[in-house]
Image (cartoon, helix red, strand yellow):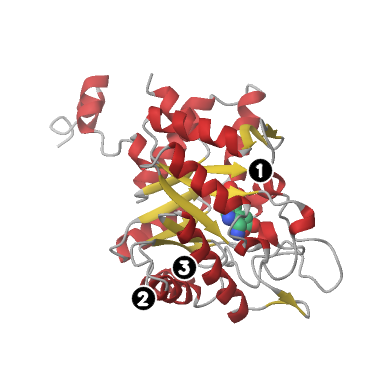
Amino acid sequence: MYPLIRNRRLRASESIRRLVRETTLTPDDFLVPLFVTEGKGIKEEIPSMPNYFRLSLDNLEKEVKELWKMGLCSVLLFVKVEDKLKDNKGTEALNPNGLMQRAIKTVKNACPQMLVMTDVALDPFSSYGHDGIVAEGMILNDVSAEVLAEMSVSHAKAGADFVAPSDMMDGRILTIREALEDEGFTNTGIMAYSAKYASAFYGPFRDALDSAPVDIANVPKDKNTYQMDYANRYEAIRETQLDIDEGADIVMVKPGLCYLDIVREIRNDVDVPVAVYQVSGEYAMVKAAAEKGWLDHDAVMLEQLTAIKRAGANIIASYFAKDFIRTLG
Ligand code: PBG
């Protein structure tokens, strides 16, 4: 057999490698996370996320026009909320004239065809930095889900195409789906963060939004009672199947790289689109190593993004979206 089969024939030139390549990234794969802040003319670099910015609404408008021109047609919005507006009830999250609601309108006015997804969780609005309402040292489930449903309706009213609940409360997808249906938003989709792990890779994101759990008595300092234990695999499947049963249109695994076994397993198991969130810490690691000259930025980025898609991701939420487009030349 030895001389008959030579696998290297299929690797002999760039042309044959291109011909037999199984996984190719395109601009259509990407969902672009954007951080929005109050003010005018603001474009603040996030210290732990080099070349990534918080944008005021005027700059958000410029950014989405640029993204559209680059061929990137889906965004995922996050807002940085002023401290004075934070409480333990999500009051500001429901403000029809809140920053998120204005951001949605800004994107839709600037670029009507841009697909707008919104983060639905209370952490940026919470005086405690938790995704739900806190009482007696616990994150309450059902009352939090009710607020998240109201928040989703508020985003839909402002023009969001999809809401993306990232909170991991039990039953929230059904609560949100029912609220959207009741209010007539039958076409508003849900992208559920279904297998969202309690991960240390979210650090830079929490810097970006100033949304980390606060260090005060009787408030849990981590999110381990709602986000998943990263040691678990079967649980990810159960969470994802439940979200689909409750009405999720798209499911998500998060973070990316450390969880590609989960991505493959879920992709094999379900028949809805699977998204993967390559999170802030993953971005920061590549940027930091590249700044030191220790890794080739673009080569490592492309290898990681391709691995995420090869593992089964149909959608990649990534801070590298624009960097990826740049590599297309
Ligand atoms: C908020 C939320 C987080 C991320 C997305 N939505 C942080 C968290 O759960 O603490 C993380 C994204 C990233 O790190 O890039 N619920």
Of tags 2 and 3, which is closer to the observer?
A: 2
For mark 2, does the 10 Å Cα neighbourhood hold few (<14), some (14 to 19), or many (20 or more) residues?
few
- Residue type, mark 3 in image: Ala
Give the residue pinned by disc 2.
245
Give the residue pinned by disc 1.
37
Which residue lies at the image location 37% right of the left edge and 62% below the top edge? 266
Residue 160 in the image: x percent, y percent? 45, 54
Residue 169 in the image: x percent, y percent? 56, 73
For mark 1, does the 10 Å Cα neighbourhood hold few (<14), some (14 to 19), or many (20 or more) residues?
many
Left or right? Give the position of 282 relative to 269: right
The answer to which of 150 and 172 lies nearer the viewer is 150
Q: Ligand 1 shows up in which quadrant of the image?
A: bottom right
Look at the picture and state if 161 lies above or below 59: below
Q: CA gap, disc 2 to disc 3?
A: 14 Å
Tell me which label, 1 or 2, sits earlier in the chain: 1
The quadrant the N terminus occupies is top left
- Residue type, mark 1 in image: Thr
Tell me which label, 2 or 3, sits earlier in the chain: 3
Residue 164: assigned label: none
